[in-house]
Image: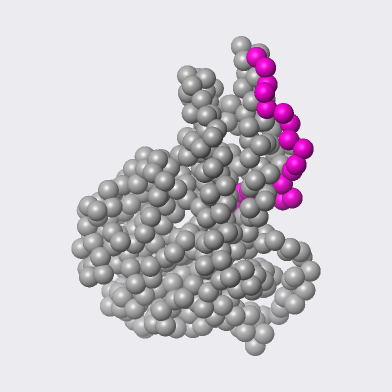
Amino acid sequence: MTNFAPKPSLRPSSPNFSSGPCAKRPGWSVDQLKDAALGRSHRSKIGKFKLGEVLDRSRKLLGLPADYRIGIVPASDTGAVEMALWSLLGSRPVEMLAWESFGSDWVTDVVKQLKLPGVKSTTADYGKLPALAEVDFSRDVVFTWNGTTSGVRVPNGDWIPADREGLTICDATSAAFAMRLPWDKLDVVTWSWQKVLGGEGAHGMLVLSPRAVARLESTAPAWPMPKIFRMTKGGKLDETIFKGDTINTPSMLAVEDAIDGLKWAEGAGGVDGLIKRSEANLSAIARWVGQTPWVDFLAEKPETRSCTSICLKIVDPWFTALSEDAQAEVAKKLASSLDSEKVAFDIAAYRAAPPGLRIWGGATVENADIAALLPWLDWAYAQVKQAAATAA
């Protein structure tokens, strides 16, 4: 078998295409953190100022409604989602939407950990969305905006009614700052610094609508609440959480890095600019997929294809004829060869997803690096396929 794909000469300037933690913003260096409030209490004047700066810049960039609260919470996006589930659910029926692994994790938490009765689970396989038009909004509805491990996003918020009875709880960690979020349709939104802005991990962001606050103040959970989940005091919202007085001790180094990312986002054209950068990365990959017979998007419909966690499947008949174990091994070798060449790190598909590739296309990734990566994908696949055929 002849390998017709020559080894490319141009390499991406940054090989960091991981889906989390994600690539740092262009031009980043550790020198950007020299003003971090290290060795100082986060409750000091400077500590509170910097935490408040993260909240204020985030609110302005995202265009949050004035009456929505925004806070920094423990344990990354996972902590923020768990905080919402444990604090807000239980007073009315729940519908869980899941079409990838993280959405499935939230189903597990609600059904097996909180053990709520009568939970409706609406699911879809990798690459698809569930029937959004059939969602019951008399229930509280929990969903991810963008499936980080499937590369499938909801196309818009038109399917969410303005006069819904239940709350909408949205895990938007790989969507915030890269996709347009309809805040009037969302009652709880969560994300982390480590995704679209390329920040560091361990800290989550939580946004609450007035409807969510009203739920917190009117209905107490029926179960014990760990300290890091508590958002009320004496039956009222603890407003200090949403003014920079965090529940536990944050990393002031990570806070400084978050500020740096937000400043960069402002200079890059705000959310509109970040969306444009992410969509340009998706478009570059879409053009390549359109002329590359061995690969396709995992997301079946173009309007549902993520512009951040861009997931690809291998559709070469040679590959699809292999056993599942053999397919997994080929995909593993494909990602490994790119890593060895130092042109793409951490782009194997998520372990629970179908074998393939997952390329982060968020705003911190330069379009020129995406363009430089694509010929390497062709080269690496040809190499792996040829090696497998020779071995057989």
Residue 217, relative to residue 3: is it above or below?
Answer: below
The x and y percentages for residue 244 are 55, 80
Q: Residue at x 57, y 81 (%)?
A: 52
Q: Nearer the viewer, residue 260 or 10?
A: 10
Q: Residue at x 50, y 77 (%)?
A: 59
Q: Quadrant of residue 31?
A: bottom right
In the picture as drawn, the residue positioned furthest to the bottom comes out as 45
Majority SS type along the magenta span: loop
Q: Which residues are magenta?
A: 1-21
Question: Does 27 sit left or right of 78 as displayed?
Answer: right
The x and y percentages for residue 66 are 42, 83
Q: Residue at x 77, y 74 (%)?
A: 34
Give the tally of numbered discs. 0
Q: Is residue 16 magenta?
A: yes
Q: Residue at x 73, y 63 (%)?
A: 27
Is residue 226 something one can see in this rendering? no
